[in-house]
Image (spheres, helix red, strand yellow):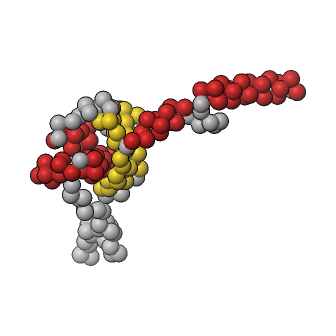
Amino acid sequence: MLEQSIRTLHNNLKNLNSKIAIGCPAGRDCQRLKAKLKMEKQKNAVGRRKEAVTRVFISKGNGNITVNDKNYKEYFSLEYLQNQVEAPLKTIESLDKFDVVINASGGGVKGQAEAAKLGIARVLIELNAEYRPALKAAGYLKRDPRGVERKKFGHKKARRSYQFSKR
């Protein structure tokens, strides 16, 4: 029992020393740290749609789009959702000039994709104000105000009533 605990401590110490040698603090994922160092010269913005909120970080790069540590084509499996995310970058013809990192939370995948579209458009304007007319003409700068209507008492849903019974 004692030998086993000494072995595990020794292995943990080895792992810790290897992470320190790489330059990673103990207990942290090295890829995230490298991504943070790379994103020093970045801009960020927030996009919202329904209950979904996305934080968008953009920097110079070669066109990688990452959503919650996954490739956006994996995260948004439907093609029309992928097109929603790409749309602002395609409008200004710079799909391969920027790396985009998106943290999405809340809502469903469609809401998150549309929130990402708004966030990307906002951060592109922050980078270069000359992109604004093209993005505005395409309608990417408008936050969609629609949300879910609340349920009313005496009704089954927001507007759906219970079935009427005459007797």
**How far across and down, in percent of the image, does residue 147 sit?**
29, 62
Instruction: Please report the residue visible at 30 percent of the width from the left and 62 percent of the height from the top.
Output: 148
Image quadrant assignment for residue 163: bottom left
Instruction: Please report the residue visible at 21 percent of the width from the left and 58 percent of the height from the top.
Output: 142
Whether residue 75 is visible to the viewer of this picture, yes or no, is no
**How far across and down, in percent of the image, does residue 27 sit?**
63, 37
**How far across and down, in percent of the image, does residue 67 sit?**
38, 39
Residue 117 vs 18, above or below: the answer is: below
Instruction: Please report the residue visible at 40 percent of the width from the left and 34 percent of the height from the top.
Output: 70
Instruction: Please report the residue visible at 29 percent of the width from the left and 31 percent of the height from the top.
Output: 63
Image quadrant assignment for residue 160: bottom left
Q: Nearer the viewer, residue 38 or 71?
A: 38
Whether residue 113 is visible to the viewer of this picture, yes or no, is yes
Residue extending farthest to the right is: 2
Q: Nearer the viewer, residue 153 or 122?
A: 122
Looking at the rendered structure, the number of numbered marks drawn on it comes to 0
**How far across and down, in percent of the image, does residue 122 sit?**
27, 52
Residue 125 vs 60, above or below: the answer is: below
Q: Nearer the viewer, residue 109 or 24?
A: 24
Q: Quadrant of the N terminus?
A: top right
Q: Quadrant of the C terminus?
A: bottom left
